[in-house]
Amino acid sequence: MKAPISAPLIAPSLLAADFTKLAQAVEAIDSSGAEWTHLDIMDGSFVPEISFGAKMVADLRPLTHSFFDVHLMTVHPENLIGGFARSGADNITFHLEAALHVHRILCAIKDLGKKAGISIVPSTPVEALAEILPFVDQVLVMTVNPGYGGQKLIPRCLEKVKELVRLREENAYSFLISVDGGVNPATASAVREAGADVLVTGEAFFKAAGKAAMAALLKGR
Ligand code: DX5
Ligand code: ZN
């Protein structure tokens, strides 16, 4: 008999919240039963838009015990990790496509006492991660092109999730696999079946009137 698959963690992205009401948004995440808070950092260079920076994260930190999952969509992530570590991030994920000395940056994040994640955009294959998979705590598979919330999930990207599950098993790696972009009630079951451990959700969560029900739906409960 197949072992029961445990429900994935839910990580609502504050990018989809009303920025004038972020304290309420954090409260809504907590009371929904979603385990993580996803913080999308956009620099206007790696992606066209600008979102918010480390001060925002630091200001939100005392309001919740939620795991702060920082997703840097920025060039030169090495320049930002100190600030985000001090702001209270629990995990800092940066993009493979934005960094040259990836292993050094992963080590620097861990030296700051934080979990270290790597992310790939839809056009980057899993093979490009081969040398660093032993060193990461999280692989964040982007299922949309980064830069905006509310886009449609690209189904082909879920093959990468399956490939990561396979590599993790074969090599006894321990990273979590997150899926980010276009996760909603229509796509969540395919994302779960591919093997994702963490589901990032922006629009689906923040547009939902019943956030606990939405979190449960995305978990497949
Ligand atoms: C995209 C961000 C995502 C995104 C998720 O650049 O990294 O976290 O906002 O939002 P939805 O679920 O609306 O695609
Ligand atoms: Zn994100």
Image (tube, rainbow, N blue to C red):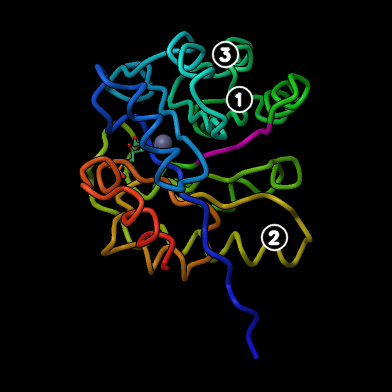
Compute the Cα span from label 2 to label 1: 24 Å
Q: Secondary structure at mark 3?
A: helix
Magenta residues, as a range? Answer: 115-119
Q: Position of residue 45 (x, y in %)?
A: 35, 17
**Along the line of sight, which residue is nearer the eye, 212 or 142?**
212
Dot 3 or dot 1, earlier in sequence: 3
Of residues 4 and 51, the one nearer the viewer is: 4
Q: Is residue 31 toward the left or the right of residue 176 in the image? A: left
The label nearer to you, 2 versus 1, is 2
Q: Give the crowd class for mark 2: few <14, some 14-19, many >=20 residues within 10 Å.
A: some
Q: CA distance from mark 2 to mark 3?
A: 31 Å
* Residue to which mark 2 is pinned: 168
**Disc 3 vs disc 1: which is toward the camera?**
3
State whether residue 123 appears in this view.
Answer: no
Pointer 1: what residue?
Answer: 100
18 is higher (above) or lower (below) than 217: above
Which quadrant is home to the N terminus? Answer: bottom right
- The 10 Å Cα crowd at callout 1, few under 14, some 14 to 19, many 20 or more, is few
- Local crowd size for mark 3, using a 10 Å CA cut-off: few (<14), some (14–19), many (≥20): some
